[in-house]
Amino acid sequence: MTVAVVQFGGSNCDRDAVRALAHLGVDAERVWHEDGLPADADGVVIPGGFSYGDYLRAGAMAARQPIMADVREAAEEGVPVLGVCNGAQIGCEAGLTDGAFTTNRSARFQCEHVHLRVERADTPWTAAYDEGDVIEVPIAHGEGRFEIHEDRLTALENEDRVLFRYCDADGVATDAANPNGSAANVAGVLGARETVAVMMPHPERATLPDVGGTDGQGVLRAFSG
């Protein structure tokens, strides 16, 4: 499988994503957004960073670049698509998933390790875990607070499209364990297809054994077929 890791001006986690995927035996290559999505891409990662300097709002400008129409089309055809951090912001802005990400409750950039509870284990992104598992991965964002209209949140819950929630080490989704004030402690969600997901924490930074642990490996294994 060849995974396209899409680069925008300001992307800075693209090399991390390629290296993490390579560690798992997945062929991945960086693709500059102006070159369009390769027709033979078997997967897509929209990586973290600060696309266009977060001008207007995080992800807004990148979401409107022509390559995102290619990504939406690929997603509709069942190609696995994962947006991470700034990529999650771009994914929401581009309509791949519901909701939006906005300024942290602290109004500060936060870089720390957090715990996530796996809400479903029957998706490509969580098949390596069991439902209720707690994993530890890092965050690094200033606009990571997941926001969604109350009615849409209810629908998201009813449709079982919440993928991860922020929790404590025991798996309890408390306000204290919510690093950015996200609605209902949501850290990652699915699109209309389960092959599409966005998440604010960085699984690629918790994949290499010598850098940040390996709890994030399961998410990226979705690309290994």
Image: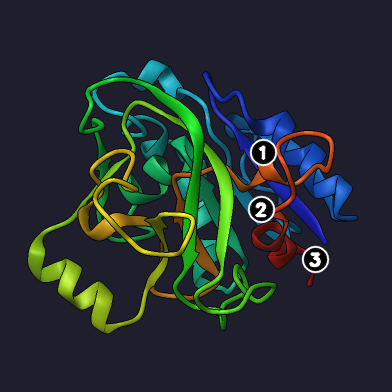
Q: Earlier in the sequence, mark 2 or mark 1?
A: 1
- Front one among 44 and 67: 44
Please tell me in which quadrant of the rendered image residue 176 appears: top left
Which residue is outermost to the front? Answer: 170
Q: Amino acid at mark 2?
A: Gly
Q: Does the residue at mark 2 contact the one at mark 3 (Cβ under 8 Å)?
A: no
Per the image, the residue denoted by label 3 is 224
> Could you tell me how far apart the alpha carbons at marks 2 and 1 are, in whole angstroms?
7 Å
Per the image, the residue denoted by label 1 is 205
Residue 89 image offset from top left, x and y in percent: 37, 41
Q: Earlier in the sequence, mark 2 or mark 3?
A: 2
Q: Is residue 5 left or right of residue 191?
A: right
Q: Nearer the viewer, mark 2 or mark 3?
A: 2
Vertical comparison of 173 with 10: above or below? below
Residue 171 image offset from top left, x and y in percent: 44, 64
Badge 2: few (under 14), some or many (20 or more) residues near its Cα, within 10 Å? many
Which mark identifies residue 216?
2
The number of discs equals 3
Q: Amino acid at mark 3?
A: Ser
Q: Earlier in the sequence, mark 3 or mark 1?
A: 1
Q: Name which residue lies at 33% across and 40% down.
A: 179
